[in-house]
Image: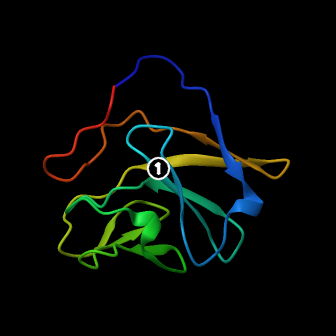
Amino acid sequence: MTNGPIDPIRVCAVSDLSEDKGYRVAAVSPPIAVFLGRDGAVHVVDDSCTHQTAALSDGWVDDCVVECPLHMSRFDLRTGAVDAPPAKAPVRVHAAEVVDGEVWVTLSQEAPNLPPGVRARS
């Protein structure tokens, strides 16, 4: 956890996003996944399923829910809450803002809920 304010980072252009799949950003640790909702809202969560190592950006998106491609756990993109097992812990949500067609993210300072055996890089 970091003390003090966190500056937003540019992660992609809105034109890089589509409503049917996630966009992985590996330049941060742990990686994050960016999703474009049907309503045009941008949602950002950690890209790792909390049950086992799987990229949520490779999952199936339906409205504001992403389904893990490995064991079908589902997560609400607005809150990070688990919508279907086997995952039990939520994914971390990050604040997103669109400025002039660019997606800017302020990373959460909460500890990530990573799957067993996975650690974030320092």
Check the image and name the residue furthest to the left.
116
Q: Residue at left 63%, top 35%?
A: 9
Would you identify the image quadrant in which residue 45 lies? bottom left
Q: Is residue 117 left or right of residue 91?
A: left
Badge count: 1
Q: Which residue in the protein does label 1 denote?
A: 32
Position in image of residue 15 (x %, y %): 77, 62
Q: Residue at left 48%, top 17%?
A: 4
Q: Is residue 72 above or below residue 88?
A: below
Check the image and name the residue furthest to the top.
4
Check the image and name the residue furthest to the bottom.
62
Would you identify the image quadrant in which residue 38 lies? bottom right
Q: Is residue 81 above or below residue 112?
A: below
105, 3: nearer the viewer: 105
Position in image of residue 99 (x %, y %): 80, 46
Position in image of residue 31 (x %, y %): 43, 46
21, 92: nearer the viewer: 21
Mark 1 belongs to which amino acid?
Ile
Mark 1, other Cα within 10 Å: few <14 / some 14–19 / many ≥20:
many
The quarter in which the C terminus is drawn is: top left
Q: Is residue 106 above or below residue 102?
A: above
Position in image of residue 16 (x %, y %): 70, 61
Q: Residue at left 30%, top 61%?
A: 49
Q: Is residue 58 left or right of residue 19?
A: left
